[in-house]
Amino acid sequence: MAVTCRQAQPNDFPALGQMLELYQYELSDIWQQDLGADGRYGYDLARHREGTRFYAHVAFEADHYAGFALVAPAAITRTDGSWMEQFFILKRYRRAGAGRALAFHVLNSHPGPWEVGEMPDNATARAFWRKVIAEATAGTFTEMHVTEGSWQGTVQRFHLGGLA
């Protein structure tokens, strides 16, 4: 599968918003959230449109969206670094290299300290990120379990100076 990835452009945000709805629906059994009066989960993408500190990235297979990643400038367990805020690959493109391609694109786009977290009941995401991060860092990352605060789950911490 030939996957291309890039930072989201203004014309990507309608599709990104729709993919976020699919993402939130898929996680609705482990992420307690309700639909708004308009029938949508309603994730606010405004801060990612600016592209100054919050970033959105998209993945394509041919001319079709395959997934997205949202990056925040504030890590969860420390004061510096990037946080993988949301990461989603459409089912059709999973286990075919799209997730790995997007993950490496995003990590390479934001060198420096990183944190990636997975919700406690999301074993699939945890296995994916452990594998990708181990490959990206040659196994030099730490993992911790966060049990207090606004975000709880497994967090991998690592530093990247850029990927090959």
Image (cartoon, grey):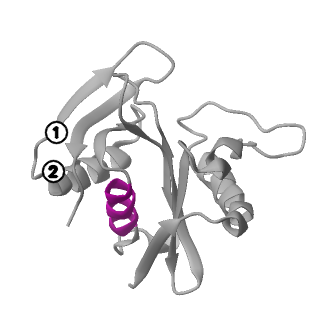
Q: Give percent across and percent down for residue 105.
A: 37, 64
Q: Is residue 101 magenta?
A: yes
Residue at the disc numbered 1: 141
Residue at the spot 42% in from the left edge and 79% down from the top edge: 3
Q: Residues within 10 Å of mark 2 (few under 14, many from 20)?
A: some
**Looking at the image, is 60 positioned above or below residue 45?**
below
Q: Is residue 89 magenta?
A: no
Q: Is residue 90 visible?
A: no
Q: Amino acid type of disc 1? A: Phe
Q: Amino acid type of disc 2? A: Thr
Labels 1 & 2 near each other (Cβ < 8 A) = yes
Q: Give percent across and percent down for residue 22.
A: 64, 56
Residue at the spot 64% in from the left edge and 53% down from the top edge: 20
Q: Residues within 10 Å of mark 1 (few under 14, many from 20)?
A: some
Residue at the spot 45% in from the left edge and 31% down from the top edge: 74
| Label 1 to label 2: alpha-carbon separation | 7 Å
Q: Give percent across and percent down for residue 122.
A: 40, 41
Left or right of 63: which side holds 119?
left
Q: Give percent across and percent down for residue 14.
A: 74, 62
Q: Kindly state the secondary structure of the residue where label 2 is placed.
A: helix
Left or right of 67: which side holds 128?
left
Q: How many marks?
A: 2
Residue at the disc numbered 2: 137
Choose between 97 and 7: the one closer to the eye. 7
Choose between 86 and 81: the one closer to the eye. 81
**Looking at the image, is 132 positioned above or below residue 54?**
below
Dominant SS of magenta comes to: helix
Residue at the spot 37% in from the left edge and 51% down from the top edge: 110
Tell me where the magenta segment starts and ends, as one range.
99-109
Quarter of the figure that contains the N terminus: bottom left
**Looking at the image, is 148 positioned above or below residue 113?**
above
